[in-house]
Image (cartoon, rainbow, N blue to C red):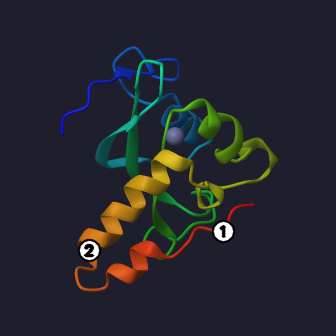
Amino acid sequence: MIRSAELDDEHLTDDGGLEPIVWVENAGYPVDILERYPTVSVKEQKENTGYLVTKIGTLSKHPNEADAVEDEIETYVCHCWNFVTEHLPKFNEGATPADISACKHIESVDKSARAMNDQGQQQLADTPVSSE
Ligand SMILES: [Zn+2]
């Protein structure tokens, strides 16, 4: 089924990138764009909204202290309001990209990515996400 959706552009850059990625870079971390996953928030009685969840490669420690191989991590970034306000850590208070947590768009992408990686181990994808 094809769903059409209006892309939420509030936290997109002029060239279609994600502002939160720019903020990670501005905090001094290298960012590799690994994959983009378009997601759609289906809303009743309202226009569906699209988000571009992006998988990035970066470092779990500041580049000054990081081992380029050992401290390499992959994480997801979204540009929804919820991610920007609650899931993107405060880098100016010592947080690192390892502290990024998942909004519901990232959760849905992560679940299906794991389900694809672990064919035959579907129960992993059904592990309930504890809410905070
Ligand atoms: Zn999101």
Disc 2, disc 1: CB below 8 Å? no
Q: Residue furthest bottom?
A: 120
Q: Which residue is mark 2?
A: 117
Q: Mark 2 against mark 1, which lies toward the viewer?
A: 1
Q: Residues within 10 Å of mark 1 (few under 14, many from 20)?
A: few
Name the residue tied to disc 1: 130
* Residue at left offset 60%, top offset 40%: 83
Residue that extends furthest to the right in the rendered view of this protein = 93
* Residue nearest the observer in this picture, 43 or 23: 43
Q: Quadrant of the C terminus?
A: bottom right
State left or right for residue 118 relative to residue 126: left
What amino acid type is highlighted by mark number 1?
Ser
State whether residue 123 is above or below residue 49.
below
**Residue depicted at 50% across the width and 76% down the height:** 127
In the figure, residue 110 lies in which quadrant?
bottom left
Q: Quadrant of residue 5?
A: top left
- Amino acid at circle 2: Asn
- Taking the spot 38% from the left edge, 22% from the top edge, the residue there is 7
Can residue 72 be seen here? The reply is yes
- The x and y percentages for residue 84 are 63, 35
The structure residue drawn at horizontal position 34% and vertical position 70%, both measured from the top left corner, is 114
Q: Is mark 2 within 8 Å of ligand 1?
A: no
